[in-house]
Amino acid sequence: MSNINTLLQTITQSIQGLTLAELLTQHPEVARRTAQRWISQLIAEQRIMAVGQGRARRYHATSASLSTLPSLSDAFPSYIPLSADSTDILAYIDQPIEARKPVGYQQDFLDSYQPNQTWYLPEPLRRQLRKMGDTGQSQLPAGTYGRAMLDRLLIDLSWASSHLEGNTYSRLDTRRLIEHGTIAEGKAVLETQMILNHKAAIELLVDNADSVAFNRYTLLNLHSSLSENLLPNPADEGRVRQHIVEIGQSAFRPLAIPSQINDMLDSVLTKASQISDPFEQSFFVMVHLPYLQPFADINKRTSRLAANLPLIRANLCPLTFVDVPEQAYHRAILGVYELTRIELLRDVYVWAYERSTQEYMAIKQDLMEPDPIRLAYRQLIKQTVRDIVTQPEKDALTVIQQTVALSVNDSDRDNVQALIIEELRRLHEGVLARYGLRPSEFYHWQSVQHTR
């Protein structure tokens, strides 16, 4: 049974702090007013502190509360191999926050990095990663492997990345939501939204693998997909940060001046785009995007999906973060924030990638080859479905026949027509982003069909 002490324990165990909604999700038997009363008491006793306003307000443990906890190093998973350098970083990060030196953004950290001359991942390690992630499809068009694995990738990456943010959806819950649009019972709305946002962002990367790049357009739209309906100010979705942010349980203070944030973001993207090796490129953005904190929130999520962009383009196994412990990942990020050192994050990255590839290689034998007709006419099929739904007054079969007659080879017409009809039959709210459709358009189309 939850009480004020178990509520405090939940807060102290979260590095990034928790909102009231997240606390209520973890303690569903506690009434909202009771939780608010306990929070007020804990703040008055200086055992927790509140950061932010409104729905975005997060509650963090104070140093007084943290000093009563066991050392965080006891919780770092022993199955993730650490170098001596990583052990040093961990020892520093595991000190009470008052023992760690306050530090701001260090521009030299980025300035000293020279693409294809500086290497965060040494050549032997890059070779090892490439061997682990080789799918045998490197010569095929960009994104071929990602499209073939899309259904699995949507579930794994959406679930694991959300889990690192404290989301309590299970893997099965996530699958039901993504495949059937079924919302899990007893979950906060923001958790459901977080999963669906990941799905939309992953589809953005995979569907546009041949054109997306490390530029503002890609990054801002990736953040916009991940942050939809989750930020207190909707104007911050896909927009470079305009105000100060604080990192909970960290002595790091990010840049605060918008013009400086914009300049450094341009520099990060320029350097990322120049890196030739996909793994170095992937790891570079996992380091420098969270360190810069270019957005009001959802920076780490953005970096995790951006880290998959070069892997998807190169038809390598994706980095799903499945089974990555939250405490390990967040400590590794703190090592970058407070020490500008990448060794601990690198060890976590390598372990996480090996874990991801083990899962994907295990199912490789069972993976059906993508339908060549569906692949060849992928964009036509999606556009036709979109045209039918957004023009419900038109007869669907007539639209399909006219489109196929104009754009499809004679030998493929029957197959393409059948594929479009199949897509329409299994259309539901969980796949609307794939066709660029809004829920309102889908529901209106459904209502028109029911009246015919």
Image: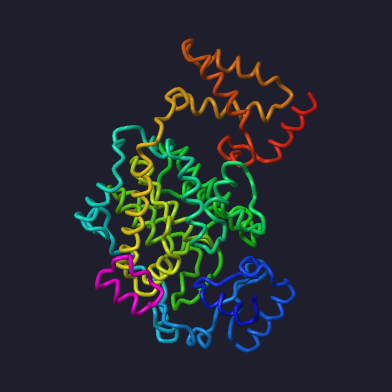
Residue 59 image point, x, y percent: 59, 75
Residue 349 image point, x, y percent: 34, 59
Q: Is residue 100 left or right of residue 185?
A: left
Q: Is residue 446 above or below residue 402?
A: below
Q: Is residue 66 above or below residue 280?
A: below
Residue 85 image point, x, y percent: 26, 72
Q: Is residue 308 above or below residue 404?
A: below
Q: How is the image coloured?
A: rainbow
Residue name at image x 31 percent, y 40 percent: 135
Residue 82 covered by magenta stretch: yes
Residue name at image x 70 percent, y 19 percent: 395
Dominant secondary structure (helix, strand or loop) of the stretch shown in magenta: helix
Regarding residue 271, the answer to whether it shows in the image is: no
Q: Quadrant of the N terminus?
A: bottom right
Residue 29 covered by magenta stretch: no
Question: Which region shows up in magenta?
Answer: 73-93
Check the image and name the residue furthest to the right. Answer: 451
Q: Is residue 88 above or below residue 363?
A: below
Residue name at image x 39 percent, y 36 percent: 366
Residue 364 image point, x, y percent: 36, 39
Residue name at image x 27 percent, y 60 percent: 120
| Front-lying residue, 312 or 352 | 352
